[in-house]
Each structure stands twice: as structure tokens, then as C-alpha cells.
Image (cartoon, grey):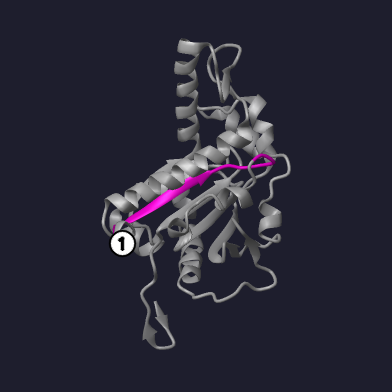
Amino acid sequence: MILNGTKFKMPTFNTVFVLGYPAAGKTTLINHLMELPQKTRLDNFGIKEPSLLTDYAFMEQAFRIDNALFKVSKLRLFSDRNADHTGYITRNLDTLLDMTSVLISEEISFRIAKQHAFFQHNTVFVELCRGSVSPYSKTLALFEDLILNGAAILYLSVTEEEAKRRNLTRERQLPTENFQAFFDESDWHTLTNGRPQGDIFIRGIPIPFVSIDYSVSIENLTEIEGELVTVFNSLRTSISKPTLASSPTDKVVNG
């Protein structure tokens, strides 16, 4: 990249939060990016060696703990089995979601402590879905500063109707009992002041975000790869800019 006649090396990402409704296409998009050739992934998207941490994976661990606890004590903390025993209905969903955020933060912190200069070589995707329970403002504030520094947010915007349609067609369906909680009163619009891109501030740390309309077909992401490159380059440019103070339109969250 050339800026004012000076060659400028675009930064790479430490952490990329991918947010959106259930069945918005978050995992599909992340897997597509992770499977790109290394040079394409690094040069076009600023993604180093990628890994993925999802709230759902940590929730599944809690469900398995519940299964074990029920066998030994007939108690369950976070879930009940649904009627046909094919899935789980969550209890205390807000507490469970907060716990998964803390566990993901701790996992990344563990990797940083274990591997010298971890973020020089790695990019971590964090996939989260929030709604009226455990809103995004609260969730993001649960992550450690060393994770938020150099992070960016990609929000996939889909209609409730489209998300529900996709949920019915995927192998791992979210039970109806849990689904609606993620659509009721999401604070994303409030957190971003309705802007499609900009910065939010968590404990004074600027985190650039871009919200994209993702209601289009996600069957062949190669067709929109050019648009995705533009989005990621916008985020890369944002994380390279030092921000001394928030502007009147930037949302500040204190953890």
C-alpha cells in the first residue's frame, strides 16, 4: 500500500471477533477464510496462522458437564435435554454466555503465555452470538486488554427471517426454545450508534468494526471474495491508526 508516496505495510490481525445472529453464516465465512492459501490469506486479509474459538463449543462443554453431573447427582446447572434428547434447552443463559466469554478469553491468554510472541504468528477468530441476554457491550468487556488490543469486529447482518430459514437447513440446529433470545433487543445497534463502521471503545481501547449485509446466498463465498477483501482492508487500515480519544459518535464501554 502506498500512502503519500511512502510504502506502508498493512497491519495484520491479532483477534477478529465475528458477531451476528444464530445461523447468520459466521462459521461458514470463518472456515472459508481459514482454508484460503496462506499467501492469499495473509496478503489480502491480514490473517496469520488462524484458529477459531466459538461460544457454542464452550457451551457444549458445559452441556457435557451437566450430563456427567446428572449421572452422579441428578443435578443439572446449565441445561435440560429436549423432549427427543437430540439437543439441549439452556438454563441461566445469560450466566452461561458470560462464562463462555471468560473461558475464551482465558484460552487466548493461555496461548499467549505459552507461546512467545503469539500474535506475531497467529490470528484468533472469536465467534459470538448475543441478544437480549448477555449483550455485546457486556460480553466484549469480559475479554482481557491484551486480546482487545489489535482486535477488530466483523458483524454479519441478516434478517431474523433469513437466519431462521438457515437454521432449519443446517445440520446443527439451534432449538426453537433458545433461538428467540438472540433476536430480542440486541444491543449491537445501540453499541455502534447505528453506524455501519467505526470504532467502539472498551476500557479506552479502540476496536474498529464493520457491519455488512450478509443476507445474500452464502453457498459460494468465492463470488464475494473481492468485497470481503475490501472490508478487511478497511479494518486493517483502522487498526493501524492511533486513536487518542473517542469521538462523539464512538461508543465507550467500561468493563
- Residue 249 image point, x, y percent: 69, 69
Q: Which residue is mark 1?
A: 120
- Residue 36 image point, x, y percent: 34, 51
Judged from this view, the residue extending furthest toward the front is 73
**Residue 219, visible in the rendered structure:** no
Q: Residue at x 64, y 33 (%)?
A: 164
* Magenta-colored span: 120-133
Judged from this view, the residue extending furthest toward the bottom is 5
- Residue 210 image point, x, y percent: 57, 60
Numbered disc total: 1
**Residue 16, visible in the rendered structure:** yes
Judged from this view, the residue extending furthest toward the left is 116
Judged from this view, the residue extending furthest toward the right is 185
Looking at the picture, which amino acid does disc 1 mark? Gln
In the rendered image, residue 121 lying in the magenta stretch gets the answer yes
Quadrant holding the N terminus: bottom left
- Residue 33 image point, x, y percent: 40, 50
Residue closest to the eye, 37 or 21: 21
Name the side, left or right, on which 8 lies relative to 220: left
Residue closest to the eye, 125 or 65: 65
Q: Is residue 228 above or below residue 52?
A: below
In the rendered image, residue 250 lying in the magenta stretch gets the answer no
Q: Residue at x 58, y 28 (%)?
A: 174
Q: Residue at x 43, y 49 (%)?
A: 125
Name the side, left or right, on which 26 lies relative to 253: left
Q: Residue at x 63, y 38 (%)?
A: 163
